[in-house]
Image (spheres, helix red, strand yellow):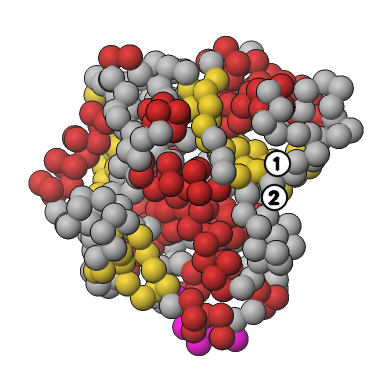
């Protein structure tokens, strides 16, 4: 039995590895202005807890609380996020390959507020409030703003959201319904980010923008922890993930490293991490193809895709994302908006799943990877469906 609720030990700059006090509010690292990563006392945790002890805990992401940053159980803000189903979905393979396809789906659309963003915001706001945050802000392309607003309401603190004018109306309405102040601006998520940072500074509120604080990635890390547990403490051959800001890739790769260090994985084998981006906004895929360690920003005037969550011209966590893909032996590829639209209907009609465009990108990528023999149908592959299609169903039909 574990002796502590959390085994959080310190924060570390993801670039130079300088350490910082984990019991103070931080955004990006002061040294390099790069993401800070939460570090844990894994040696003690390996001694104090066996993975089998987790099985009887509540079916939320907080079953892994020792590997999450919140110090005390009473500080947890939860709406039941996590432990989303891992579903066999062979009929999402190309017609004729269904019997051979070892294809699984992690359905994140079943989280509170309808997307994987609930995980990150639950962790980030729980820890921020525990450390004394009086209000929170975030830029959003849609789902993150709705999730932050929900958990701010749960905490009883004010929230501010900035978003592009063409962000999904359903997400903006959600955020306002939860009581958040929302400003819609001309431009992209990067422009909304500048406004959010200004508001945070003016009001003394905490900015929980993607990878500009340490704990959203920790919440998303639980996708990887769950996947391992659901597969009997092993991992699949490949993961296909739709990458905008890329926090999910950063979080899961960190989770796998922690699980391996803890000795909890059955064989220690890690999956190929495959990212998919939209053809009209693919800074990470371009960097992979060009062999670069950092992703040059996609020109804002050329950032075009109907998948709002993939229209991210630059990612502060680019080095971490590219590193994870390369270390795993994975790749990056792009798909078109038309391919995403086709695959939303394919998922609905073949497996009864109503998914977001970003999720549909993973199916299109899977089909391309099979066609080019980069993946085989027999390779156990997990697609991450990061959000529900309900907010945008009118665009598919």
Question: Which sits in the foreground, 142 or 214?
Answer: 214
Disc 2: CA contacts within 10 A as few (<14), some (14-19) or many (>=20): some
Q: Secondary structure at mark 1?
A: strand
User: Residue 83 falls in which quadrant of the image?
Assistant: bottom right
User: Residue 12 falls in which quadrant of the image?
Assistant: bottom left
Q: Is residue 327 above or below residue 336?
A: below
Q: Is residue 250 above or below residue 58?
A: above
User: Majority secondary structure of the magenta segment?
Assistant: loop
Please indicate whether residue 371 sits to the left or right of residue 274 in the image: right
Q: Secondary structure at mark 2?
A: loop
* Residue extending furthest toward the right: 99
Instruction: Look at mark 1 in the image and give the residue it sits on.
Output: 381
Q: Which quarter of the image is occupied by the C terminus? A: top right
Q: Is residue 354 visible?
A: no
Task: Say whether residue 53 is magenta.
Answer: no
Residue at the spot x=86%, y=34% of the render? 100
Residue at the spot x=64%, y=71% of the render? 264
Please indicate whether residue 49 sits to the left or right of residue 34 in the image: right
Are the residues tagged 1 and 2 within 8 Å (C-beta)?
yes
Q: Position of residue 285 (x, y in %)?
A: 45, 29
Question: Which sits in the foreground, 178 or 226?
Answer: 226
- Across the whole image, how many numbered discs are drawn on residues? 2
Disc 1: CA contacts within 10 A as few (<14), some (14-19) or many (>=20): many
Residue at the spot x=81%, y=29% of the render? 91
Q: Position of residue 20 (x, y in %)?
A: 24, 69
The span shown in magenta is 1-7
Task: Say whether residue 3 is magenta.
Answer: yes
Q: Position of residue 14 (x, y in %)?
A: 32, 56
Checking the image for residue 236, the label placed there is: 2
């Amino acid at each position: 039995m574990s002796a502590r609720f959390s085994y959080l030990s310190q924060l570390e700059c993801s670039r130079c590895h300088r350490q910082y006090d984990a019991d103070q509010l931080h955004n990006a690292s002061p040294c390099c202005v790069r993401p800070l990563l939460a570090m844990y006392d894994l040696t003690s945790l390996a001694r104090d807890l066996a993975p089998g002890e987790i099985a009887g805990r509540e079916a939320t992401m907080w079953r892994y609380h020792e590997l999450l940053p919140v110090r005390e159980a009473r500080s947890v803000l939860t709406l039941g996020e996590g432990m989303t189903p891992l579903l066999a979905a062979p009929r999402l393979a190309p017609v004729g390959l269904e019997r051979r396809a070892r294809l699984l789906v992690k359905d994140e659309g079943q989280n509170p507020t309808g997307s994987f963003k609930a995980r990150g915001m639950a962790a980030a706001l729980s820890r921020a409030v525990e450390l004394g945050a009086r209000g929170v802000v975030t830029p959003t392309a849609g789902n993150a703003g709705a999730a932050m607003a929900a958990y701010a309401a749960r905490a009883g603190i004010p929230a501010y959201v900035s978003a592009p004018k063409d962000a999904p109306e359903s997400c903006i309405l959600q955020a306002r319904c939860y009581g958040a102040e929302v400003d819609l601006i001309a431009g992209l998520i990067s422009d909304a980010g500048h406004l959010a940072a200004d508001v945070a500074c003016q009001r003394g509120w905490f900015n929980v923008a993607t990878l500009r604080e340490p704990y959203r990635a920790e919440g998303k890390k639980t996708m990887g922890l769950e996947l391992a547990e659901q597969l009997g403490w092993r991992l699949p051959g490949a993961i296909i993930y739709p990458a905008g800001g890329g926090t999910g890739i950063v979080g899961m790769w960190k989770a796998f490293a922690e699980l391996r260090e803890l000795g909890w994985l059955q064989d220690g084998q890690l999956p190929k991490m495959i990212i998919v981006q939209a053809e009209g906004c693919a800074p990470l895929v371009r960097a992979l193809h060009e062999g670069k360690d950092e992703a040059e920003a996609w020109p804002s005037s050329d950032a075009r895709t109907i998948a709002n969550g993939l229209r991210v011209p630059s990612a502060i966590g680019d080095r971490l994302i590219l590193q994870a893909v390369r270390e795993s032996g994975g790749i990056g590829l792009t798909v078109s908006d038309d391919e995403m639209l086709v695959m939303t209907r394919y998922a609905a009609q073949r497996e009864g799943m109503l998914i977001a465009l970003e999720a549909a990108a993973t199916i299109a990528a899977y089909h391309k990877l099979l066609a080019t023999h980069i993946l085989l149908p027999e390779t156990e592959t997990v697609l991450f469906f990061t959000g529900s299609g309900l907010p945008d169903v009118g665009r598919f039909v």
